[in-house]
Image (tube, rainbow, N blue to C red):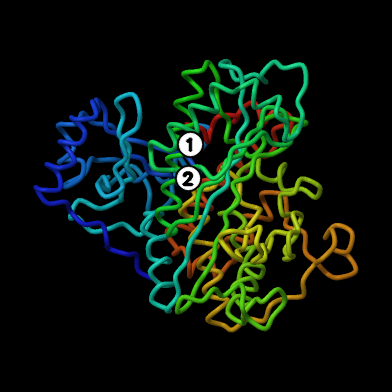
Amino acid sequence: MSIDRVLPVPDAAALDAAAASLAERGVRIVVGTMVNNAGLTLAKTVAPDRLGTFARSGLGASPTWNVFCIDGGIAFTPDLGVVGDMRLRLDLDALTILEGGLAWAPVGLFDQAGEPLPIDSRARLRRVQRDIEDSGSVVLAGHELEFVVTAADGEAFPRPGWTPYGLGPVIDHEAFLADVLTESAAAGLGLEQLHAEYVPGQFEFSLPPAPPVQAADAAVLARVVVGRIARRHGLRASFSPFPFAGGGGNGAHIHFSFTRDGRPVFSGGDGPYGITSEGGGAIAGIVEALPGIQAVLGGSILSGARLQPGYWSGAFACWGRENREAAVRFLEATPGNPYGANVEVKPVDPSANPYLSSAAILGAALEGIRAQSALPEEVTENPADVAAERGIAQLPSDLASVLEALRGSEIAERVLGPEIVAAVAAVRGWELEHHGSTPPDDLPARFRFAWSI
């Protein structure tokens, strides 16, 4: 699968309009970000008068940006080493002006000749989205992210107690949360909800459905917004899969829905809950692909601590209506579900590159539709209680097994391309080699803010 070449070079009129908007809003710094294969958010910044260069010819960066690791190491591969250069080109169409004089946009990856690079995760997701659209369907995706607030020094926020989903935690952080809601709305994110979660110090927000590339951009931008505001309030926000030893994990669940000819594929059909044959194929495709793409959805050295039964993290490769222990949770079309029937994939955590996790999920769903795969039997109980008798696979929590499955996954290579699969295997393999023997209780503190802004 070749990557999508679409990232237009802006013309003079578009650049002039963007520059005028920046000046009018008092922007002093323009940030362009990429998310690499370890899930790290990397950036280049310019003054507003350099906007044209950033958007047209791009700024230089080493290809090793793609394999920078969570500990500062570099997982060199035969194709990603000290020789060569990338150009990071700002996507002017996604430029967003934030409060406080900062503007943000994602970047595309190109070589010196202006050719797109197959390692570009955002371009890969764009290609998957286009493949779905070319098949006659329309897809929307939405991200839910959990994070843990800490004191400025990174330690657990001092509080006498924590009521899961309670009002008390919201009032404790009322000014911070109010700013998150206000500034998210100003940035065009429009959070659907924001609430205290189960784990002490943990909050969750939901982003509205959008086309997949736009939805993944929103997930990245939301972290930028939360990270900036947390600092202003003397806090830090941890997007680690497992921030504190003995605690709970952060998820980064992805919801999606398909429609064909204006009709939803997850309702109005003859299957369970109205699932159509295409909808069943999409669910089947994901369930079947899960072991091979797990390294992309949450394959960090900390992800296995979260992906456990009882954590509502989707540790079992199965599906079920409103089943929060199944990897694939089905949400039926009901009056209480304003967006209609959709599917949530739960094993995803914040160590994942949101462009790659989206591409892997949606690509697997499309493969299931094309293969006319049959909807597997639903799991209506807690999977942990019936896994043995029904042959339901628990997703592995050890990184060695996760990596082995990725390296042997044909669907991962078809959907993501060999360059990206090799890079993901390299950075996660580095984590296993350099930190696999570290006592598990020491890892959360070491990498608490690796995936934060």
Q: Give the spatial CA distance, label 1 vs label 2.
A: 7 Å
Residue 19 placed where, x, y %?
16, 37
Q: In this image, 149 relative to 258: left or right? A: right
User: Amino acid type of disc 2?
Assistant: Ala
Q: Position of residue 17 (x, y in %)?
A: 15, 42
Front one among 411 and 166: 166
For the N terminus, the image quarter is bottom left
The answer to whether 128 appears left or right of 110 in the picture is right
Determine whether 231 is above or below 345 in the image: above
Position of 313 compared to 84: left or right? right
Instruction: State which quadrant residue 292 falls in.
Output: bottom right
348 relative position to 418: left or right: right
Amino acid, disc 1: Arg
Residue 398 coordinates in the image, percent (x, y): 71, 49
Q: Secondary structure at mark 1?
A: helix
In the rendered image of this protein, does residue 327 appear above or below residue 377? above
Check the image and report above or below for 403 versus 68. below
Labels 1 & 2 near each other (Cβ < 8 A): yes
- The tag on residue 85 is none
Disc 1 residue crowd, few under 14, some 14–19, many 20+, Cα 10 Å: many
Q: Quadrant of residue 45?
A: top left
- State the residue position of label 2: 219
Label 2 Cα crowd, 10 Å radius (few <14 / some 14-19 / many 20+): many
Q: Which mark is residue 223?
A: 1
Residue occupying the point 62% across, 67% down: 286
- Kindly identify the residue that appears in the image at 67 percent across and 27 percent down: 201
Question: Residue 320: percent from the left, percent from the top?
Answer: 74, 65
- The image quadrant that residue 29 belongs to is top left
* Secondary structure category for the residue under label 2: helix
